[in-house]
Amino acid sequence: SAVISQKPSRDICQRGTSLTIQCQVDSQVTMMFWYRQQPGQSLTLIATANQGSEATYESGFVIDKFPISRPNLTFSTLTVSNMSPEDSSIYLCSVEDKGNYEQYFGPGTRLTVT
Amino acid sequence: GIQVEQSPPDLILQEGANSTLRCNFSDSVNNLQWFHQNPWGQLINLFYIPSGTKQNGRLSATTVATERYSLLYISSSQTTDSGVYFCAVDLTGGGNKLTFGTGTQLKVEL
């Protein structure tokens, strides 16, 4: 399975600022995904990021708030813009394993907005 | 959209006990995975099981796709089994966008 790392692992940010989260994979993958897990809740898909094309956002998530980059097949970033306390969550990236549909997740970025 | 419900929402076990967690989904799926989220937030893959039965040590899973449910069995539970268990599904032809269930919070006590 792919090995996935995320930076930062956690951060505390002030409202109105932006944070960029990095996701690095140890092998080339076609599809990368970004999820949000609000406190005490399940995971919700934010967007799908494919290399060479615009990210596809799920209902309730917009590019201005969560811009995503996918410059190559091993890396992606998610920016949380103009943050408010409601953005306090764990943000996780995942990748689809080659050859099947199984997804693997990074360790997550725990964001607190004050 | 697809609904994914898990039961029970919370479960407390004594070490050594067995348990069954259930995942019901409202539509046909072509991907179903079980995850364990440990207390540090890491999601650990347990099973990729769109249909049939699989076993891995003390854990096993069964998915009956035609009846739209999956079961996760934990035998001889240990304190390290504590955490949240999620099932996640992808609609047939949905491009592998996982919809996560509501989760089961498990605590195993000595």
Image: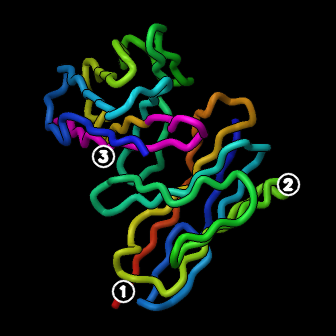
Residue identifier under label 3: A107
* Residue found at x 51% / y 65%: B104
Q: Quadrant of residue A62?
A: top left
**Do the residues at discs 1 and 2 belong to one chain?**
yes
| Alpha carbon separation for disc pair 1 and 3 | 26 Å
| Alpha carbon separation for disc pair 1 and 2 | 36 Å
The x, y position of residue A35, in whole percent, is: 43, 35
The x, y position of residue B84, in whole percent, is: 44, 63
Q: Is residue B2 left or right of residue A53?
A: right
Q: Which chain contains the residue that carries disc 2?
A: B
CB atoms at circles 1 and 3 under 8 Å apart? no
Q: Secondary structure at mark 3?
A: loop
* Residue found at x 61% / y 34%: B96
CB atoms at circles 1 and 2 under 8 Å apart? no
Q: Amino acid at mark 1?
A: Glu
Circle 3 Cα neighbour tier, 10 Å, few/some/many (<14 / 14–19 / ≥20): many
* Residue found at x 54% / y 67%: B9
Front one among B75 and A109 = B75
Q: Which-is-in-front pick, marks 1 and 3?
A: 3
The answer, for residue B105, to whether it is visible in the render is yes
Residue span colored magenta: A95-114
Q: Is residue B21 left or right of residue A32?
A: right
For marks 1 and 2, the one nearer the N-term is 2
Q: Amino acid at mark 3?
A: Pro
Reply above or below: B19 against A96.
below
Residue identifier under label 2: B66
Q: Of all residues shown, which one is farthest toward the right?
A: B66
Q: Which chain contains the residue that carries disc 1?
A: B
Reply above or below: A64 against B62.
above
**Do the residues at discs 2 and 3 belong to one chain?**
no
